[in-house]
Image (tube, helix red, strand yellow):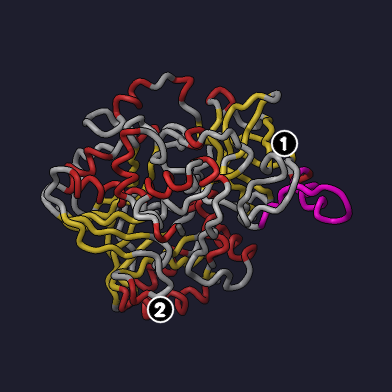
Amino acid sequence: MTDTEHQSLQNKIDAHGDLWSMLYDAHGQRFTFPVQAEFSNWIDEQRAWGTSAIFQNMSHHMTDVYFEGPDVIRLLSDLGINSFDGFGSMQAKQYVVCNYDGQYIGDAVLFCEEENKVSVVGKPMVANWLRFHIETGDYDVQVKHIDRPSANLTDRRLFRFQVQGPNADKILEELNGGPLPEIPFFKMGQFNIGLHRVTALNHRMSGAPGYEFWGPSAEGDAVRALILEAGAQYDIAQIGGRIYPVTACVSGWVGSVLPAIYTGDKMRAYREWLPGNGFEAMHSIGGSLATGNVEDYYRTPYDLGYGFMVKFDHEFIGRAALEALRPEQKLKKVRLVWNSEDVVAIYASMFGAGDRYKRIELPVGNYTTSPSDRVQLDGVDVGVSYYPVYSEADRSCISLASIRPDLAVEGRELTLIWGEPNGGSGKPAVERHIQKTVQVKVDPEPIKRG
């Protein structure tokens, strides 16, 4: 039976018989962003974030699901760790949902332009969890539309663009015909791109000035042309799909965590609802955290830097488990700066005879959907690292990680085990290799915002 013939995720798990192997040796293909890979080269495109301005087309790669009805906020509150006190029209929120044991399922951005209408934008895990509870729970909410990733803008209701960098405000003010409105952090507002009215979110991606904004997809090509024309004198650079995950990592967003849905009786009904060829069913895991236990890849919101979002002012799925967590059970999200000599040694092993280390593909070394590598102190595991990227701003490989909070100290030296044990897993993207110990230094403030 092929993956596409499985009726549900649970059917696929049952048919395979070995959940660990199903995920760790998965033969699925890596996700490719449905946008041009590079417009110039990925080093100059990274550099433009800090020196001029970038244009990023985010219209194609995210799932955008529209929910509407009088119980929308109640639904979001019942499932999310976030407080919805005062949430309403022209507001946005980064939103996190957990399973019944307080373990992370996913995060997305909520956009509320009108009362009782919310779009959920990001990877599909959050929207799927919401849809399941609409169908199985007592909520007066309708799913009005689903925009799935597509290379064709005509398949989408909205274009979604981002202009950011030191020159971003100059470009947008010129297109607006005057000063931009004051839009506080993670709030929404409106301005003009020539004759086109757009709605914008201020989230200060990568710590640079600028906005994410959107409008009807039919106007997308015209808006893009206006931005590039106005931005030419300010050295605007279009960025391609090769560095999309780099910008996420540099901005402190861990977008590669395994959703905690694959085990447990309470989650079985959800696995039976999810399709056998959907996003969750095609997931893969990898890295040196090869314990044979899928649950070792589960994380809590605290591990991913979302602890400040956890609000116990409402009942929500996973609340009791999160309230019961002891301080020592909560990991701290940090940035790890990889030792350049160790990275060079990894590349040097490709030349000549003998064993080779697992290659780090640049600029992004994610060879599986949800990688996790061991982070150690004196040979003892103290956390996990996610995929590495090459950061032009740092002139180093870096990764985000979840580590013991007492070790989240500037300059703290730890070791990271790069590569999979026993020559590598059965994933087609993994060549035969041996593991390498990499020295890393801790940066306890992974989110850089201006």
Residue with the mark numbered 2: 226
Q: Main secondary structure of the magenta part?
A: loop
Q: Decide if residue 341 is on the left or right side of residue 39.
A: right
Please provide the residue range marked out in magenta: 342-361
Q: Decide if residue 281 is on the left or right side of residue 349.
A: left
* Kind of residue at badge 2: Leu
Q: Position of residue 194 (x, y in %)?
A: 33, 77
Q: Decide if residue 25 is on the left or right side of residue 98.
A: right
Q: Position of residue 354 (x, y in %)?
A: 86, 49
Q: Residue at x 38, y 40 (%)?
A: 261
Q: Residue at x 50, y 64 (%)?
A: 33
Q: Nearer the viewer, residue 302 or 208?
A: 302
Q: Position of residue 195 (x, y in %)?
A: 29, 78
Q: Which mark is residue 131?
A: none
Q: For residue 100, which quarter of the picture?
A: top left
Q: Is residue 86 magenta?
A: no
Q: Nearer the viewer, residue 123 or 57?
A: 123
Q: Which mark is residue 439?
A: 1
The relative height of residue 231 versus residue 94 in the rendered view (above or below) is below
Circle 1 crowding by C-alpha within 10 Å: few under 14, some 14–19, many from 20 = many
Circle 2 crowding by C-alpha within 10 Å: few under 14, some 14–19, many from 20 = some
Closer to the chain start, of discs 2 and 1, is 2
Q: Is residue 349 magenta?
A: yes
SS type, badge 1: strand
**Which residue is at the far right?**
353
Observer able to see residue 185: no
The relative height of residue 1 versus residue 297 in the rendered view (above or below) is below
Quadrant in the picture for the N terminus: bottom left
Q: For residue 143, which quarter of the picture?
A: bottom left
